[in-house]
Amino acid sequence: MSERINLTIIPMGLAAFSAALDNNVLNICLPILANEFNTDIGSVQFVSSAYVFTICGLLLFFAYISSAAGRKYIFSAGVGVFTAGSFAAAFSTSVPCLILFRVIQGAGAAMFMANGMALIHSHFSDSVKGRAFGVMFTATAVASIVGPVAGGMIATHWGWRTIFLMMVPLGVLSALLALGLLKKENRTPMKSFDGKGAAGSIFFVLLFFISFLYLQKGDIKLFILSILCSLATLYLFIRFQKKAGNPIVNIEIFSQKVLWRANIQAGIIFSIMIGVGVILPVYIHDTLHCSAAYSGIILASMAVSIFALSYIGGYLADKAGTYKIVSIGILLVFIGMLVLGCSIYFSMKETLFLGNILLGAGIGFFNPANNKIVMLSVPVKFSATAASINVLSRNAGIAVGTTVAGLSYALLIKMGCGTIMSAFYSLFLFVILSVIVLIIHAHDVHTIFTEITHKI
C-alpha cells in the first residue's frame, strides 16, 4: 500500500469524472432528444433512467465476481465497456436504440464503480485513504459543475451526439492508465456461483428503484405493487444468502453497526442534496421569478463548495480522525439546511448562496470520511461488496430525495399553500432528515463539542 497519493489515483478519478459527467451532461439534452426523435419527454427520460438503473442493478454482481476475476481487470474492462457504449450511443437512430446503448454504458459503469473504492482501499494506506476518496469526490464535483454548462453549449453548437463522442478519449485514457498503473491483486478462486443470489440482488434493486419511478408519475397502485415485490425479493434474497456456499453478499458484514450507520447517513445526506436541487429551482422560478441561469448559479455554489472542500475533508479525515470530520460535515449540512429554510421563509434571496455553500461544505467533509469508515469497517475481501452497498445507499437516497421533494411541493401547491410555504414545508422535510443524521451521530458530535469546550 502506498503511504502517499500517487498516479494510481488518476484512472479511478477519471472514471468517476466520466460517469458523473456523462449523466449530468445528458440530462440537459433530454428536450433536444425528444424533439429530434419526435417523442415526449417522458419517453426520453428512460435514456437517463436506464443508465442509472443498470448501474444499481449490477453493482453487487460485479463486486461479487471481481475478487475471482481481479479488480484491476474488472475495473479496466468496465471502463472499456462504458467507452464502447458511449461510442455506439453517438450513432443511435432511435430512442430504443439509444436506451440499449445506455444500458451498455451503465453495465460498464457498474463494473468500475463496484471496484473503485475497493481499489483505493487496497492501493493506499489508512493514513492517506481519506485524501484518495477526497480526490474521487472532487472529480465528481467538477463533473457536476462542468456538466450542465458543457452539455448545453456542446448540444447547441455541435449536437447531442458529440456528448457521447467526447467520452471516448476520456474512457480510453482511463482504461490504459488502469491497466498500466493499478497493481495486480491476489485472486480468490470462485468455488461455486450463487446464481439465485445474483438474480435476487438484480431484481430487488431494479424493483426498488422502479417503484420510485412510478411514485414520481403518481401511479400509487404500481408503486405499492413494486415496493411489495421488491421486499418479497429481498426476503428471498436473504434466505438464499444464508444457505449459499459462496453468497453474493456475505450476511456477516451486516453485523457491523458501523457499516449500517455509515450507509444510512450516506443515503440521507444524498437525499438532502438532491432534494435541495429539486426544490430550489422551482422556488426561484415560481416565487422569486428569476431565470433558470440564476438557479444554476445558486446550485453551482453547492458543487463548487464540494469541489473546494472534498480533498481538504479527506486530508483532515486522515489527520484528525474520520468520525470527527464526519461530525463536522453533518453539522455543516444541518446549519446549511437551517439557513436555506430561513432564506425561503423570509424570502432572503441573497442567503440562498450561503445555505448552499454551507451544505456543499458539509457534503465535502462528510463524503471522503464516510467512505473511509465504510472501507475500514469490513475485511479487505468484502471491500468491493461494502463499496457497492455504499453506492446503492447513495443512489437510494437520490431516488427518495427526488421523489419526496417533487411530490411534496406539488401536493402542497394543490392544497393551496402558496409557492413560498410549499417550498418551505418541502424543504423542512429535509431539515428533519438532517436532524435524524445528527441524532444517529449524536455521540461523536457531543465529543467534538466537549473537546472544543475544554480548549476554550
Image (cartoon, rainbow, N blue to C red):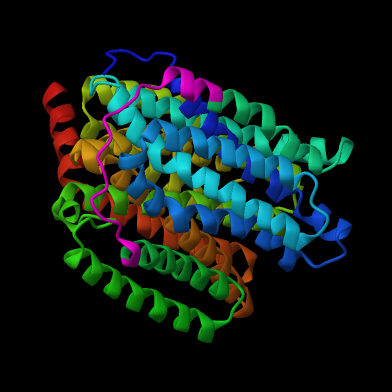
Which of these two is toward me, 175 or 162? 175
Q: Is residue 109 left or right of residue 389?
A: right
Quadrant in the rendering for residue 193 = bottom left
Q: Is residue 93 above or below residue 82?
A: below
Q: Is residue 141 left or right of residue 364?
A: right
- Magenta segment: does it hold 354? no
Magenta span: chief secondary structure: loop
Which of these two is toward me, 145 or 136? 136
State the residue lying farthest toward the bottom. 221
Q: Is residue 120 left or right of residue 96?
A: left
Q: Is residue 368 left or right of residue 44?
A: left
Range drawn in magenta: 176-196
The answer to whether residue 342 of the structure is visible from this angle is no
x and y, in percent, of residue 430 in the image: 43, 58
Q: Residue at x 32, y 71 (%)?
A: 234
Q: Residue at x 46, y 39 (%)?
A: 112
The answer to whether residue 163 of the structure is visible from this angle is yes
Quadrant in the rendering for residue 410 = bottom right
- Magenta segment: does it hold 191? yes
x and y, in percent, of residue 356 in the image: 52, 40
Quadrant in the rendering for residue 248 = bottom left
Q: Is residue 142 above or below residue 430?
A: above
Q: Is residue 65 above or below residue 420?
A: above
The N terminus sits in image quarter: top left
x and y, in percent, of residue 210 in the image: 52, 69
Which of these two is toward me, 396 or 447? 396
x and y, in percent, of residue 441 in the image: 22, 47
Q: Residue at x 30, y 21 (%)?
A: 124
The C terminus sits in image quarter: top left
Q: Residue at x 28, y 35 (%)?
A: 187
Which of these two is toward me, 57 or 78? 78
